[in-house]
Amino acid sequence: MLDVIRDFGQGGATLLLGLATGAGWVAAIIAPNCFYDGLDAGRADRQVRNLLKAVSGPTAIMLLAAGALGILGGVIGAAVCAFLAAFGFFTNAWTLKGFKRGETPPGAKRRRSSQRIVAVGLTLLFTLVAAIGAGLSMFGV
């Protein structure tokens, strides 16, 4: 009976970590390339920011579930990677925080661009962490 629970936890963690890796890859690499090919720079920047804000929350929740299943399945290394990646995806909400109306400081355009660059970089970094966690979960670590 316990083997079935362990196998379910390990398999579920592997599945969710793989899905989160795919979501991060699409949000950080594929979609921005398509946006910048078809739109002008301002609209593409806005679309990338909105996409990263929209994807980060559900991906982080998926990674938290993967971490819980990893603990249930006994793959603690994968669970630690999942929790670390979930924290990283949650930070995108703070990184891409906008300004309140009427409070736009001077140099805001440069700041928005650097926020997007940092958010894409963090998404790629924590996507790599999720991919490592998926590999660890596949091998039972």
Image (tube, rainbow, N blue to C red):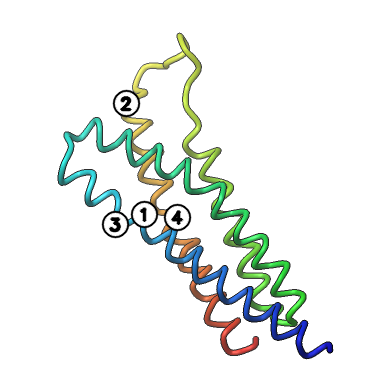
User: Tag 3: Cα neighbours inside 10 Å, few (<14), some, or many (≥20)?
Assistant: few
Q: In the image, which disc is placed on residue 76?
A: none
Three-letter amino acid code at disc 2?
Lys
Q: Judging from the image, what secondary structure is the residue with disc 4 in?
A: helix
Q: Give the residue number, with chain letter if any, for mark 3.
A: 30
Three-letter amino acid code at disc 4?
Thr
Three-letter amino acid code at disc 3?
Ile
Q: Residue furthest top?
A: 102
Q: Earlier in the sequence, mark 2 or mark 1?
A: 1
Q: Locate residue 91, reporting x and y percent.
A: 56, 46
Q: Earlier in the sequence, mark 4 or mark 2?
A: 2
Q: Locate residue 114, reporting x and y percent.
A: 36, 38
User: Tag 1: Cα neighbours inside 10 Å, few (<14), some, or many (≥20)?
Assistant: many
Above/below status of 10 relative to 31? below
- C-alpha gap between disc 2 and disc 3: 24 Å
Q: Give the residue number, with chain letter if any, for mark 4.
A: 123
Q: Give the residue number, with chain letter if any, for mark 1.
A: 28
- C-alpha gap between disc 1 and disc 3: 6 Å
Q: Give the residue number, with chain letter if any, for mark 2.
A: 109
Q: Locate residue 95, reporting x and y percent.
A: 50, 39
Q: Earlier in the sequence, mark 2 or mark 3?
A: 3
Rendered residue at 62%/80% (across/down): 11
Seen in the image, is 45 located left or right of residue 127?
Answer: left
Residues under numbered marks 4 and 1 in contact, where contact means CB atoms less than 8 Å apart: yes
Three-letter amino acid code at disc 1?
Ala
In the rendered view of the protein, which quadrant contains the N terminus? bottom right
- C-alpha gap between disc 4 and disc 2: 21 Å
